[in-house]
Amino acid sequence: MGGDGFCGWPTSLHLSRNKMDVTIIDNLSRRNIDNELGTCSLTPVATIEERLAKWKSISGDTIQHFNIDIAQEYTRLAELIERIQPDTIVHFAEQRAAPYSMMGSKQKRYTVNNNVNATHNILCAIVEKDLDIHLVHLGTMGVYGYNSEGFSISEGYIDVDVVQEGKRSSTRSILHPMYPGSVYHTTKCLDEVMFYFYNKNDQIRITDLHQGIVWGTNTKETHLDPILINRFDYDGMYGTVLNRFLMQSALGYPLTIYGTGGQTRAFIHIENTIECIRLAIENPPDGDRVRIFNQATETHSVEELARFVSNLTGAKIEYLENPRREPVCNDLNVIADSLQELGLHPICLQGVLCEEEVSIARKYKHQCDVSKILNSPPWRKSPVQEIPSKTRFFPQKRTHKNRCNK
């Protein structure tokens, strides 16, 4: 589901190359959102028909595509699942951008309607057709929130003591408390609750991958031909912070940090993303509870990231008012052992791969619409101004530990 998107497309090719029979269901909504926003990928993205034809000519494998809005066309979805009877459904079919989900009431409602209905329709179809299907879902580390709580984030569950009359009566394993920071992140929290119910009630086997921010553009498969190239989003709605920095450096502009730059996030390379999906498929859970993996390989603060790009390209750094509602600084200690125990080989933010991202930004910079780089919306209509409007400030240099989970 969502096999034409930024993560879905290279995953589809990777699974096909690994001798899996792949079918894509995608209503091409991400392409339509580009039209709505007046943006496009920096890299030239071919049509889905051109992509699939090129893949067949290179690999000899056929990937079918069905244009179905799975959030609205339940009957078509259920009938296709019954006809194909897949071993695994990989669910990428959600609106993935936090800034877009906060743009206005139209985008907020679309994000909830699309994401929640899509997830629930898949679950309903599996139950209705009485099929034993392993559902692999791409979630987000954002369900945990980004407050500095002083403890490590475990993989989906925490053990809590139940106290009655002042005495500990029992210990229970519960879902990690959820602290969504946007409407998009809220839908991922709702996904998690639905997974919990359908696993408990209907014994659906589910793997929920709480993924960090994805960096990188191409994979071994998308490198095979220019027609297969993956998306490179740089705008304030869909572009990741690293892509924005790379785009600004390619144009000779300063790297703009929102707020203090102390916001720490988890990261993962796109090659590792598709590897994680394959590992989850090849190692299905037994179904006793929803299996949750933290899908991340390293953590960095935004300021660390900017300094990394600055050292790589020579770009200057500037600080701007933060349009988001988030802590000005946070720690993020992530436990992400399970996927590495299954065989994941972490790719960290350094060396040849980042140089490749710089070269992509420079090669296609003539296609950049500069007006879209800083178009992220405010998180609410009248945000509390922790930083005076239009003020740029330069905090004292801080030392952050570069954490790479090797």
Image: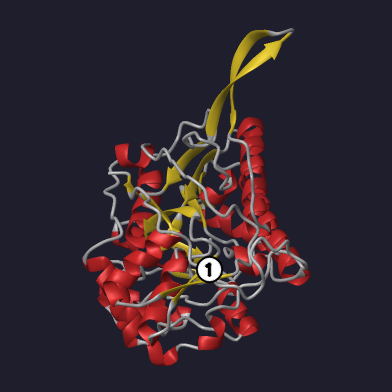
Side of 182 where 258 appears, left or right: left
Side of 92 where 255 appears, left or right: left
**Tag 1: residue type?**
Phe
Pointer 1: residues within 10 angstroms few (<14), some, or many (20+)?
some
- The percent position of residue 33, horizontal first and vertical second, equals 61, 77
Seen in the picture, residue 383 relative to 280 is either above or below; the reply is below
Colour mode?
Answer: secondary structure
Residue 272 occupies quadrant: bottom left
Side of 229 where 238 appears, left or right: right
**Disc 1 designates what residue?**
393
Q: Residue furthest bottom?
A: 366
Name the residue rendered at 62%, 54% in the picture: 185
- The percent position of residue 156, horizontal first and vertical second, equals 52, 36
Camera-side residue of 334 and 138: 334
Which quadrant holds the C terminus?
Answer: top left
Residue 118 occupies quadrant: bottom right
Name the residue rendered at 31%, 41% in the picture: 340
Q: How many marks?
A: 1
Seen in the picture, residue 18 relative to 222 is either above or below; the reply is above
Q: In the structure shown, which secondary structural element does the residue marked by tag 1 occupy? A: loop
- The percent position of residue 113, horizontal first and vertical second, equals 73, 61
Name the residue rendered at 47%, 83% in the picture: 47
Side of 69 where 87 appears, left or right: left
Residue 218 occupies quadrant: bottom left
Camera-side residue of 174 and 80: 174
Q: Is residue 362 visible?
A: yes
Q: Residue furthest front?
A: 396
